[in-house]
Amino acid sequence: MNVLSLQNVVKVYANHVAVDDVSFDVRASSIFGLLGPNGAGKTSLIRIITTITAADSGKIFLNGQPLNHLHPNEIGYMPEERGLYKKMKVGEQLLYLAQLKGLSSKDAKIKLRAWLEKFEILSWWDKKIGDLSKGMGQKVQFIATIVHDPKLIILDEPFSGLDPINTNLIKDEIYQLKQKGASILFSTHRMEQVEEICEDIVLMNKGKIILNGNVQEIKNDFKEHLFSVKYSGKAPSEMGTSEYETLSQNDNEIIFKTGPAFTSNDLLRELLNQNVNIVRFNEILPSLNEIFIKKVEANNE
Amino acid sequence: MNKIWLVTKREYLTRVLNKTFILTTLLTPLGILLFMVAVVFIMGTGSDKAKVINIYDPTDLLGRELKTRDNLTFHFSNESLEDQKELYKAKKINGIIEIPPMKDSMATKYSYKYHSDDQLAMDESIGIESAIGKKIRNYKLKKLNIDEKTLKNLDTDVTAEPVTIFENKKISSITTIVSSVLGGIVGYAMFFIILFYGMQVMRSVMEEKINRIVEVLISSLKPFELMMGKVIGVGLVGLTQIGIWLILMPIIFFIGTMIFGLNTESVGHMHTGNIPVEDIAMSSQDKIAQIFIEIKAMNWLKILPLTLFYFLAGYFAYSALFAAIGSAVGEDINDASSLTIPVMMPLMFSMYIGFSAVNAPDSSLAVWSSMIPLISSIVMPVRLPFDPPWWQIGISVISLILFSILLVWLAARIYRVGILMYGKKASFKELSKWIFYKG
């Protein structure tokens, strides 16, 4: 079951194509990464999904239904450029935002109290946002995004400007929300931040999707059969086979590049035969950043 | 619809519960009252020091009697001036008024002499001048052998009595004056209220944009709902404030009258510039009574709902435009001033036409501009007390409704694009492009 499904979405602004024939699905109860450099069209796409703007063509389905005016209540959106009313009290403000998402005043109060208690900030209810620190404001902002139990949570650069403690807090919260059945769509240009938490990703560049799929599968597809071996004592001697070559060797660490048919087990077996004392052995997988750069360069050629 | 209501509620409550709002709403009528009390007090205390003044009137021009409102005590003395000056030196008196004989009994210029090293206060000398003037007048009347009654009969109070030919309604000369004042006040008030609360809408839009909360908001509701909620909310704040003032003003005025002993007589005294009130009191009381009759006779059932309509239509159109402008500013709140000019222009324009309509409510300028939408929202209310024909009101109302809807729609088109644009403030060329943006 897909919570979100995009089919051939196009958005053209006066002078450029912001979103160019984009299609992808977000599975229910998953963490999805929408990645790409600044200006790739991520925010334009998100504004279409959140019904802030409309697509010029293409179809969008939320929970199997074509996107309509009731859907914003099922989406929680934390924009990249975010803020709150500085002169309004935390409680009033959250209550207002929750009611705008369709919650009744009574339900909103119950849920907000629970969330504020969870984040240990219930005592802030009557404080004005302007009197809070930036990190405190971010907690309030996050609660405003998720208080109405949205099926789809869209976070645009969620960790920008967040301190490490709040980053971890929100990461934990995201895992828990996923466990409860929500899907989280991350949008960021900092790919290293999300590769550990995203299951599926879409890589965008200049409005187009250049890569789409499961993070592990993508990494496997782009692996270059590199293995790192750390050893102690005797170094492995040169082997006469063309199945692998030594790329670098220093400080008791050696990096091999193997041929596609030569598996990690083959390599291990070879090393054990040589009686090498292996301390650590791992495959070097490319980072999303590296894959992205490679992909963009390949597209440009 | 429900979401418009939520926005309205927030805009209304955050404003009405704001300390500044409460203070200005409550203190403004009090401030006006204090100002009036202060003015009366200042005007009334020009001559707080009692002065004793001798009058040397050898030809008995004044008939041994002189009265002014001030704290002056007059003594008529036939002692020689030199002797009286001794009294002055002994500080028994503050000065001597010397009344020289009238050489020509019909002279239109006359001056008395005031012997003293201190000058008379402005109001004291005005009081003395007018009192002596009256005495000389009586003296002249006696010389000419005319009594007061004959003289009064010389003056004729000419007024126009308008008589309608087709319409069966009663008008008096004072109707025009009452209508003018009423129309003028309404026009002026409309201008300021629309401007003031329109600006508030603009500021509120800018605040949300600069705060960066706007994108969170419009992921929950349509920009149009946000804009309308804001316009309605601020409008209700305006009605609340005006309502409170309409109730508070008479109450505070009444209380003020009780506490400060502020009575209409002394206010009247202030306005008439020390001319004794008694002289005009009779006729003005009649006039005031007549004004009240005229005010009562106005077709309030027609004027009130229509004025409210013009206010609402004008307010909606203008404040939607102000909202659009608020959405077009960049990061800097000062950007707004140059963008507001095109909206201010018709507003100023209609206020000036409104003023001319007070003088000539049936001039072709007034008639036409009271039917041109937007301008009509200020000019027509000015004309309403003059009872314009129904067909003009009809055209005016319909065109204003249609045009206001069009303007609100256009403003909403600009607003929806503007609130998401950051960076430099937009130019008018860009604003007109935004209107045609899709989705």
Image: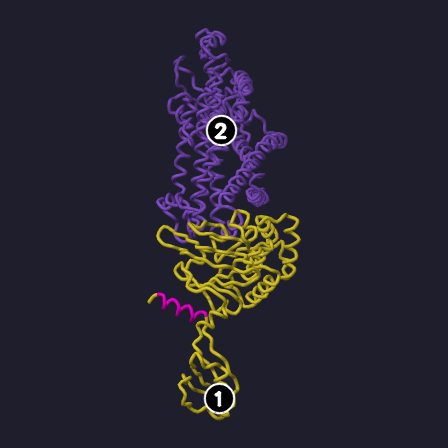
- Against B32, is A242 above or below? below
Q: Which residues are magenta?
A: A288-299
The amino acid pointed to by label 2 is Val
Q: Is residue B238 at least partly visible in the picture?
A: yes
**How many residues crowd around disc 1 within 10 Å: few (fewer than 14), some, or many (20 or more)?**
some
- Against A101, is B118 above or below? above
Residue B320 drawn at (x, y percent) = 46, 40
A289 drawn magenta: yes
Identify the mark at residue A222; answer none if there is no mark.
Answer: none
Rounded to the nearest angstrom, the CA distance separating label 1 from label 2 is 98 Å
Q: In front here: B330 or A36? A: A36
A143 drawn magenta: no
Q: Is residue B281 at least partly visible in the picture?
A: no
Q: Which residue is mark 1?
A: A271
Subunit that carries the residue with mark 1 = A
In the picture provided, is B24 more to the left or to the right than B379? right
Which chain is assigned purple? Answer: B
- Chain A palette colour: yellow
Q: Which residue is mark 2?
A: B186
Residue A148 drawn at (x, y percent) = 60, 53
Subunit that carries the residue with mark 2 = B
